[in-house]
Image (spheres, rainbow, N blue to C red):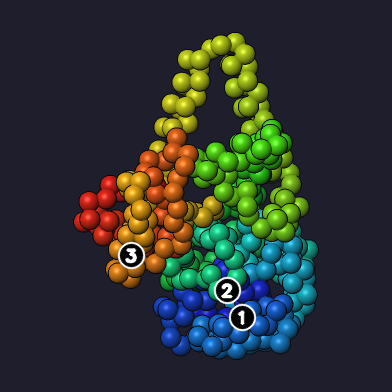
């Protein structure tokens, strides 16, 4: 089986950095080179020895790499692919990590490099971006979609599949077209819906911003992805327009169906709607990594007394458990517990539960 010893990353943020960290954790005799538009943002990766060298340009070191990861935004990956294609040796595998596969596969076909191009998409992420937020742990148990074309050499698919397993992700093989339709449904359209729902409430709110005041809780949870990077989502929508529109049409039709049910007063159908959707959702995997990054939140019942929030924070700090945010939940229609505590990772959240329960706090896991 083909083995990769020298890795070149073109673009080096959250996902590229996390893959590189994972590779460094599980392999000792490899060389990792990275390039980013702003050198200063990846110098920490050199300092902490995640990478061995910073490339001067995306065109340098191409002849030395066994595998090249394109880790910039979707459209930038295509531009970088066009720039490097004439210079990359035929025995070097090129892959990417973008959430849209059709456009970059078409580019690879047109450039005549389909035999050694293999699209990839790690179904993981965080709310924050950049190398500083990267972590090998976010790759663990995350689905990593691989989209070989009919021209991709089987040995590259085999080697990339093994690499994905090596960084403890779960490889799934799918065609570029099937990938783009699926991600439109489970990721791209939900982000657009969240943004539209927030804007609907904003436009319906009064001058005193009453809706905004009481929106904390369930509404804020289900619309948190509306705060995603605007530039990234513009790029995704440009690249996957037809699939997004197709799924949006289906969603629009479903909303019209619900409106018709309400108009007729057929409320048993509303019960059926929630029963069917609840049943389908319950059957979904509870993996901690996905296309939409998971929140790690605990809700805690505390008495309305001075010093209670400080007491909880102190207990966690004494156990060396870091918290991301802490605050009172004023609207608790969809969340039990008066205090909400968010954590950076699942391990910290799980460690906090016995600490709080030992001191007789009632803890509700999100």
Residue 278 is labelled as none
Q: Is residue 116 above or below residue 188?
A: below
Q: Earlier in the sequence, mark 3 or mark 1?
A: 1
- The residue positioned 71% from the left and 67% from the top of the image is 77
Q: Is residue 93 above or below residue 226?
A: below
Where is residue 22? Give x, y as percent. 46, 74
Q: Secondary structure at mark 3?
A: helix
- The residue positioned 42% from the left and 41% from the top of the image is 335
Alpha-carbon span between mark 2 and mark 3 = 30 Å
Residue 213 seen by the camera: yes
Mark 2 or 3, closer to the camera: 3
Residue under label 3 = 314
Q: Earlier in the sequence, mark 2 or mark 1?
A: 1
Q: Is residue 145 above or below residue 202?
A: below
Q: Is residue 79 left or right of residue 342?
A: right
Alpha-carbon span between mark 3 and mark 1 = 34 Å
* Depth check, front residue: 104 or 331: 331
Q: Pointer 2 and pointer 1: residues touching (CB < 8 Å)?
A: yes
Q: Pointer 3 and pointer 1: residues touching (CB < 8 Å)?
A: no
Q: Residues within 10 Å of mark 1 (few under 14, many from 20)?
A: many
Q: Secondary structure at mark 2?
A: helix
Q: Is residue 347 left or right of residue 226?
A: left
Residue under label 1 = 42
Residue under label 2 = 131
Q: Is residue 156 left or right of residue 109?
A: left
- The residue positioned 51% from the left and 83% from the top of the image is 50
Residue 186 seen by the camera: no
- The residue positioned 51% from the left and 15% from the top of the image is 267
Where is residue 115? Give x, y as percent. 66, 68
């Amino acid at each position: 089986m083909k083995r990769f010893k020298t890795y070149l990353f073109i673009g080096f943020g959250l996902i590229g950095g996390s893959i590189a960290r994972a590779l460094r954790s599980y392999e000792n005799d490899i060389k990792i080179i990275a390039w980013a538009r702003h050198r200063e943002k990846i110098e920490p990766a050199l300092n902490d020895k995640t990478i061995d060298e910073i490339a001067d340009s995306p065109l340098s070191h191409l002849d030395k790499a066994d595998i090249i990861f394109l880790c910039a935004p979707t459209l930038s990956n295509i531009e970088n692919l066009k720039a490097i294609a004439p210079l990359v040796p035929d025995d070097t595998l090129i892959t990417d990590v973008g959430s849209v596969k059709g456009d970059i596969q078409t580019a690879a076909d047109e450039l005549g490099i389909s035999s050694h191009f293999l699209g990839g998409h790690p179904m993981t992420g965080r709310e924050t971006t950049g190398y500083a937020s990267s972590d090998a742990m976010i790759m663990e148990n995350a689905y990593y979609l691989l989209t070989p074309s009919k021209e991709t050499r089987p040995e590259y698919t085999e080697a990339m599949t093994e690499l994905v397993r090596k960084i403890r992700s779960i490889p799934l093989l799918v065609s570029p077209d099937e990938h783009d339709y699926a991600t439109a449904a489970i990721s791209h359209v939900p982000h657009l819906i969240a943004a539209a729902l927030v804007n609907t409430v904003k436009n319906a709110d009064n001058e005193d911003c009453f809706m905004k005041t009481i929106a904390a809780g369930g509404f804020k949870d289900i619309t948190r992805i509306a705060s995603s990077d605007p530039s990234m989502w513009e790029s995704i929508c440009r690249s996957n327009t037809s699939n997004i529109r197709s799924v949006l049409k289906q969603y629009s039709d479903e909303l019209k169906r619900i409106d018709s049910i309400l108009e007729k007063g057929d409320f048993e159908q509303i019960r059926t709607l929630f029963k069917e959707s609840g049943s389908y959702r319950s059957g979904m995997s509870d993996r901690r990594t996905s296309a939409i990054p998971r929140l790690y939140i605990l809700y805690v019942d505390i008495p309305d007394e001075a010093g209670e929030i400080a007491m909880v924070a102190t207990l966690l700090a004494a156990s060396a458990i870091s918290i991301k945010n802490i605050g009172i939940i004023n609207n608790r229609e969809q969340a039990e517990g008066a205090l909400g505590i968010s954590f950076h990772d699942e391990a910290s959240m799980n460690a906090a539960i016995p600490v709080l329960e030992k001191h007789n706090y009632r803890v509700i896991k999100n």
